[in-house]
Amino acid sequence: MNGSRIAAVGHYQPAKVLTNEDLAGLVDTSDEWITSRVGIRTRHIAGPDEPVDELAAHAAAKALAAAGLNAADIDLVLVATSTAVDRSPNMAARVAHRLGMPSPAVMDLNVVCAGFTHALATADHAVRAGGAARVLVIGADKMSEVTDWNDRTTCVLVGDGAGAAVVEAAEESGIGPVLWGSVPEMGHAVRIEGTPARFAQEGQSVYRWATTQLPAIARRACEQAGLTPADLAGLVLHQANLRIIEPLAEKIGAVNAVVARDVVESGNTSAASIPLALSKLVERGELATGDPVLLFGFGGNLSYAGQVVRCP
């Protein structure tokens, strides 16, 4: 086994749905104001009794079931999140406990909105290096817990949820080489900091950076997989804002790809956004097994990571 592949995916969102009309009752905003600027119409919000690891465990259980595996089959759990409240136990350990795993290695990765694609690359590397046979990779965030609900520029963006993928050893690689990096001098443009921690961003700076710098990086990720953007069947970008996703997709040149637009109904779920959107495309049958899909995360730290994967 010289490669790795995504065997299955799964996702989970809390039951409570917050509409633009609901938000208009909380802050000075409207459905027209929100949709015209960010394209979001609804988002799912977790309750106080729904912690990050619970969201993650629900998505993970669905991915395991889709792969036909038991919790004991997993030997490494990676959870990408930036909204873990406690330092220890980490989210991966708590997910492993919830699912009844006997003795997996457990690690959290905090790369904010690009967390899942970083974690997926880490899983790929671990499998190909022989450090793990099956890895559970989860992106989960409870953004509602770090949001200032009096700030209309940020509270209209966020949602809660989780997405997961099972990565396993394969004879041929189904996960392409990762292209990752960051712009440290602009790391302050997306922040979750302070006491209590609060999400803030410099929206115009992020928009300009994403729409001008990221298309070339995304095309290089395709090149590393031996493909052109026109070869892609799917394009799953971080679901930050529809007004970023659409011009970015056009500039990348994925003219034949199904473009994920889950942000419209889920909002920005940070590290959860890519696996959540991918899982929904698979569930709806919009992508077929073996289809080449570019996953591309970007955001906090002004980090980015992308790779072409074969759809499970």
Image (cartoon, grey):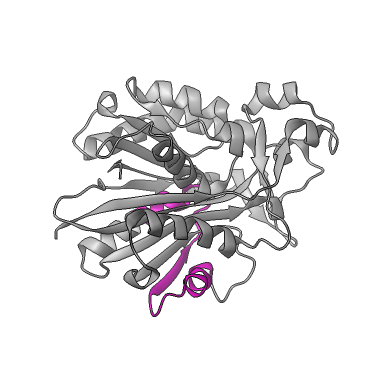
- Examine the rendering and report whether any part of residue 301 can be seen: no
Q: Where is residue 54 in the image (x, y as percent from the top left)?
A: 58, 63
Main SS, magenta region, reads helix
Please provide the residue range marked out in magenta: 91-120
Q: Where is residue 142 in the image (x, y as percent from the top left)?
A: 63, 54
Quadrant where the N terminus is found in the figure:
bottom left
- Identify which residue is drawn at 74% across, 62% down: 195
Q: In this view, does 224 lie above or below 271?
A: above
The residue at 42%/33% (across/down) is 214
The relative height of residue 37 versus residue 118 in the rendered view (above or below) is: above
Residue 240: x and y in percent read: 56, 37
Q: Is residue 312 left or right of residue 88?
A: left
Q: Does the magenta stretch include residue 99?
A: yes
Residue that sits furthest to the bottom in the current view:
103
Using the rendered view, name the quadrant where residue 230 is placed.
top left
Res 135 visible:
yes
